[in-house]
Amino acid sequence: MKLEVISKEVIEIVKRVGSFIEAESKKLSTADVEVKGLNDFVTYIDKEAEQRLIRELKGMIPNAGFIVEEDQSQKKAAEYNWIIDPIDGTTNFIHSIPVYSISVALSFKDEIILGIVYEINSKECFHTIKNQPAYVNNKIISVSENNVPGKALIATGFPYHDFSLIDPYLLLFKDVMQNSRGIRRLGSAAVDLAYVACGRFDVFFEYGLKPWDVAAGAFIVKQASGKVSDFSGKSNYIFGQQIIATNNLLHEYFIKKVQRYFI
């Protein structure tokens, strides 16, 4: 399998679907918004974008499975699996806040080997494959070189439906706020991770995320010389619903800080 060829084709597919999302966003009304759960929304655009991605990706790797947000009829396969979020940041999308993205990862026997995050509004395409550097629009990127916690710019996501850990989260939030350069909450975990990969953020942490939120972005961080773990410092961050992604230099420091409140 030539991952370089597949990656180029997937990037083109993602950009086409991004153009569809951008065009349809101008027609979106409140009547088009469905409520799946507490502060959990979906539109016909999410669903159609996901179907377009599935249709085009299905023919690329025979017998590949799909781990996706909306179409639960799709099944995981034994070897290759596409992990897709058609619009990461749907709440931003429905409120016309221009930070949302398409996230596509490919795994082989549960190891991620390809990751693409396409921020639709800026038209920045972050991408990488196994054993290659990470890129944004074909320019090599790398995590920041900051090793001073007080100079770190931190990204996170606020709890919006799972409030079971809100008390330790707020204590950690206060600690980080007082001991860093600042905290940002963009509303798209995939974009947060991509920004760690290119050095805009030094650290990203969040709980309650799904595989399609983090699979591609976390892989891009790792290929850009960053480090990714769950809150315990282990590798169960794709399915474990806890993630810390850093520039590597600040990872152990931030793990200890998180564990002060969560472990």
Image (cartoon, grey):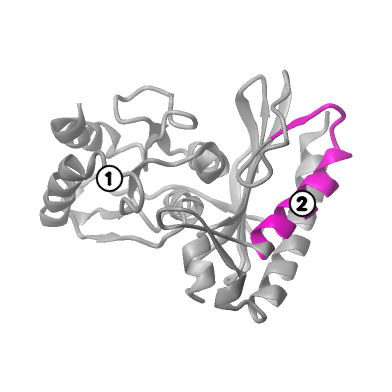
Q: Residues within 10 Å of mark 2 (few under 14, many from 20)?
A: some
Q: Residues within 10 Å of mark 1 (few under 14, many from 20)?
A: few
Q: Amino acid at mark 2?
A: Gln
Q: Residue at x 74, y 53 (%)?
A: 11
Question: Disc 1 versus disc 2: distance between alpha carbons?
Answer: 31 Å
Q: Viewer-proximal residue, 81 or 226? A: 81
Q: Which residue is mark 1?
A: 163
Q: Please say whether residue 244 is one of the residues in the magenta stretch.
A: no
The rendered magenta stretch, by its main secondary structure, is classed as helix
Q: Give the quarter of the figure containing the C terminus.
A: top left
Judge from the rendering whether residue 174 lies leftward or rightward of residue 120; answer left or right. Answer: left
Q: Give the quarter of the figure containing the N terminus.
A: top right
Q: Which residue is mark 2?
A: 51
Judge from the rendering whether residue 132 lies leftward or rightward of residue 8; answer left or right. Answer: left
- Whether residue 131 is visible, yes or no, is no
Q: Residue at x 84, y 26 (%)?
A: 63
Q: Position of residue 181 (x, y in %)?
A: 20, 60
Element type at marker 2?
A: helix
Q: Viewer-proximal residue, 222 or 160? A: 160
Q: Position of residue 50 (x, y in %)?
A: 71, 52
Q: Which residues are magenta?
A: 45-66
